[in-house]
Amino acid sequence: MTSATKDNRIIQSYLFFNGRCEEALEFYRKALGAEIDLLMRFKDSPEPPKPGMVPPGFENKVMHASFRIGQSTLMASDGCSGEKPAFEGFSLSISVASEAQADQYFNALADDGQVKMPMAKAFWSPRFGMVEDRFGIGWMISVTPTEHK
């Protein structure tokens, strides 16, 4: 494999909110300053979904969205299910430059969510905490340590 091939690979998270995607996007916009790059609804698809693929009433739901938080791009959808999503086995991690910014993001994500580990000093970071937001997404917030001179 050439280095050019390696450089073109990108891994992005794709989150399925099962009917709450638009609400989640607005929450992340307010909580983290997310910027929505693209939002396409099922009714806007050039090809209608096959019968039974999308629950009734999902015409106005989000088929695909792309949004940025800082330099990272995430994707999201309402998916094809109205059941409660299960976000298990992973967390999203945000590294910021200041303790104040870490606290701001942590508190915003904790609103109607669940604190898993309160913000505190850790051996790898001056401030670190874990929270599950109101949608069930796990987040790890940390301050990027500055080098000691």
Image (cartoon, rainbow, N blue to C red):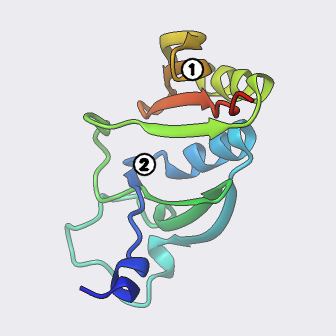
Q: Residue at x 57, y 20 (%)?
A: 128
User: Residue 62 location, x and y as percent?
Assistant: 49, 62
- Residue 98 sits in quarter: top right
Residue wearing tag 2: 19
Q: Is residue 129 above or below residue 135?
A: above
- Residue 56 sits in quarter: bottom left
User: Residue 23 location, x and y as percent?
Assistant: 58, 44
Q: Residue at x 49, y 15 (%)?
A: 114
Q: Position of 107 compared to 128: left or right? A: right
Q: Amino acid at mark 1?
A: Phe
Residue 6 in sight: yes
Q: Which mark is residue 128?
A: 1
| 2 or 1: mark nearer the eye | 1
User: Residue 125 location, x and y as percent?
Assistant: 58, 23
Q: Position of 104 compared to 49: left or right? A: right
Q: Residue at x 66, y 62 (%)?
A: 36
In this rendered view, identify the residue nearer to me: 19 or 131. Answer: 131
Q: Amino acid at mark 2?
A: Gly
Q: Tell me the distance, in whole angstroms, between the alpha carbons under discs 2 and 1.
A: 31 Å
Mark 1 Cα within 10 Å, few/some/many (few <14, many 20+)?
A: many
